[in-house]
Each structure stands twice: as structure tokens, then as C-alpha cells.
Amino acid sequence: MERELAPRADGSSNVGRRAFIGTAAAVAATAATLTPSDAHAAKNPPVAKNLAASPPPGFSPFNAPGKVVKVSKADSLQANKLYPKPDAAKEMLTKALTELTGKPDLVTAVQQFVHKDDIVVVKVNGIAQSQMATGKELVLPFVEAMIEGGIKPENITLLEQYAGFFNATRITAQNVPAGVKIASHANGNATMDERHIPGTGTKTKFVRWLTEATAAINFALIKDHSICGYTGALKNMTHGCTINPHDFHVHHASPQIALLYAQDVIKSRVRLCIADGFKVMANGGPLYKRPEFVKPHDAVYVSTDPVAIDTVGWDVVEKYRADFKLKTLTEEGREPAYIKAAADLGLGVHDREKIVLKELTV
């Protein structure tokens, strides 16, 4: 089944002019709070060193802006309703990536995104602890396929912000292929020069596992967020790979998430976004504080477009919120305007009439 995402009749799922104005106001308000020295730096930021990554010579990673593939499988969770069944997760991942790329098997599909000479960082997510983290059942088959496709295990690092978050994924040194590294950065361990992020009045560094990589694979979730409304692919990279993510939360983190993702460090490296949609958190996120708002969804989403996959994910959250008879994120004052801002920065497609969502069942 393939369909285009039409805007909702009431327009509530489109950011539109109001959110654009809100985004502009956020930038203006941020600037208004700057000290004179900060304001001068914001107007005249030092030229940042180019930290864009390039694919290995002769390799062009697969890219399909605006295309999202969703694969569903009924009863995909284990009896505990916390983790996906390993066979189901691999089957769903394989179907999603072969459909996205048109290739016949998982290894060949993965080879469309990463080359044997790449240095790869795989960003996982465990902030909601083991009750709702990117599961090892989904991540490890991808890692194994990269190795089977020719990437050296020692050139693969699985990364999360804190050790506790990483542990929640249940990925360990004992269950990854030999040679693969696991790491957490605790908002530190950055080797790049500090840089100002234009439009935010704030500076940061990205952690070294990202800057030292040539490619990044982004394993995200589909969740409500108490500050920015929705957290998915975009925020997993921005606030999960900087040394001071707390400094980019004001004004509902909009447009900061978009402005951070637009930095060459991130946008030149992320080759693929995979959303673990086995469960959806409709309210109370990003931590696991309101389990009554977490429901099975039995799906995996894949896309090379972080904006498109987050637009789709946002709509999924809104559907579950409606089922719970909750207000929309916009009505609650938490509209994730940064998604539209990211599209405005050329990071992907947000217009639902231009997003093609292909839905499959296995």
C-alpha cells in the first residue's frame, strides 16, 4: 500500500504560518536575552571549520527525500510486551530496507547506505529506560548486515548519551559482534573546536564519535516530549550528540533542533533513519513516567529523510493522543515547530502532500 500524506482537515498537523512566526519569534526572543558580548558574537560568529564528512571515493549513498517505508507485523512483541521478538524485528527491518532500496536482501540493502571503508557511528536511544528503548533485536541485525557487507567491526561504534541509557537498549559488549565498540559520552569527550550555532545565540561541540565517523545510522523512537512536543530522528542526533543539550531546550527547542541538525557535522553524516515503532509513547515523554500512555504499535519505519520520518511519527503520536482523548500537541502549546523549520533549512520534506508513505504488512 502506497499513499501520500494529505494534511488534516483541520490543519492541526501542519505547522503552517503560525508555527513559522513562532519559530521566528523564538529566534528573536533568544537574541533578546543575549549579553552584549554574546550578541556581538551572534552577529559576527567566527567562521567554523568545515567538518563535513564525505563518502568514500566512488560511493554515492542511497537517498530518497520524502519517502518513508512502514512495515507492520501483528503480535511482534514478546510475551512481556516490552521487547520485539528477534525474528519479527529482523523480518520487518529486512522488508523495510529492501522496499526502500529495491534490493533483494538485507545485506545488499544496507550496502546502499554504508561502504566497506566507512567509519560508522550508530546512534541508539535509551532515555526511557528498557521499557521503551531502541531494542537490540532491531539494532543488532543491522550491525551484523554491515559487517557481512564488508565493514570492519572495529570501524563500527554504537553510541548513546549516558551509560544508563545505553544499558537500557540491552546491547552489551557480550552480544555485539566481536570488535564492534560501544560508547557513551555523558555530554563530553568532544575534540572539535567550539562553534556558535547560528540563530541560537549558543555554542556547542559535537562528540568525537560523531566527528570521527564518516557515516551515521540513526535509530530513533516515536515519542511525546514534554518540551518540544515530539522526539524522533532529528532530536536523537542533535540533543544526543552535543556536549550541552540542555542549552538548546528553550522555546520548546524550536528552531534549535533544526539549526543543530543543519550543521555539517550531522547533516553530512546521517545516511539512514530507522524508527523503532514497536511501541508509541503518546504522552508523558521523553522519560518512562506515564506507562498508561505507551501502547503497542508493531511497526518499523525507515527513511533517508529525517524530516519526513519525523512528520510521519508526529502524526502517529497525534493519532494515539486522539485515542486517549488528549489535546493535540498544538493545543497543548507543544507543537514541534522545529520539524517545519528543518524542512525550511533544506533538511527534508515536511509537506504531507509530498511525503510518500509506503505501508506494508508481513
Image (spheres, helix red, strand yellow):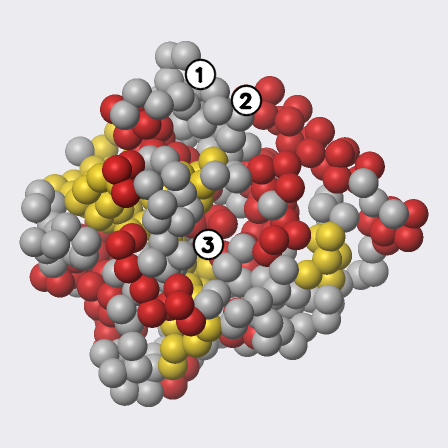
Alpha carbon distance from label 3 to label 1: 27 Å
Residue 317, picture quadrant: top left
**In front of the other: label 3 or label 2?**
3
Q: Inspect the image, locate mark 2, and give the three-letter code of the amino acid beneath it.
A: Gly
Label pair 3/2, CB-CB below 8 angstroms: no
Provide the residue designation for mark 2: 16
Q: Inspect the image, locate mark 3, and give the three-letter code of the amino acid beneath it.
A: Asn
Q: Position of residue 87 (x, y in %)?
A: 9, 61
Q: Position of residue 7 (x, y in %)?
A: 39, 20
Which is more toward the observer, 325 or 171? 325
Which is more toward the observer, 129 or 206? 129
Residue 338, picture quadrant: top right
Alpha carbon distance from label 3 to label 2: 24 Å
Question: In what element is the residue under mark 3?
Answer: helix
Provide the residue designation for mark 1: 11
Q: Is residue 76 left or right of residue 208?
A: left
Mark 2 is surrounded, within 10 Å at the Cα level, by few (under 14), some (14 to 19) or many (20 or more) other residues, namely few
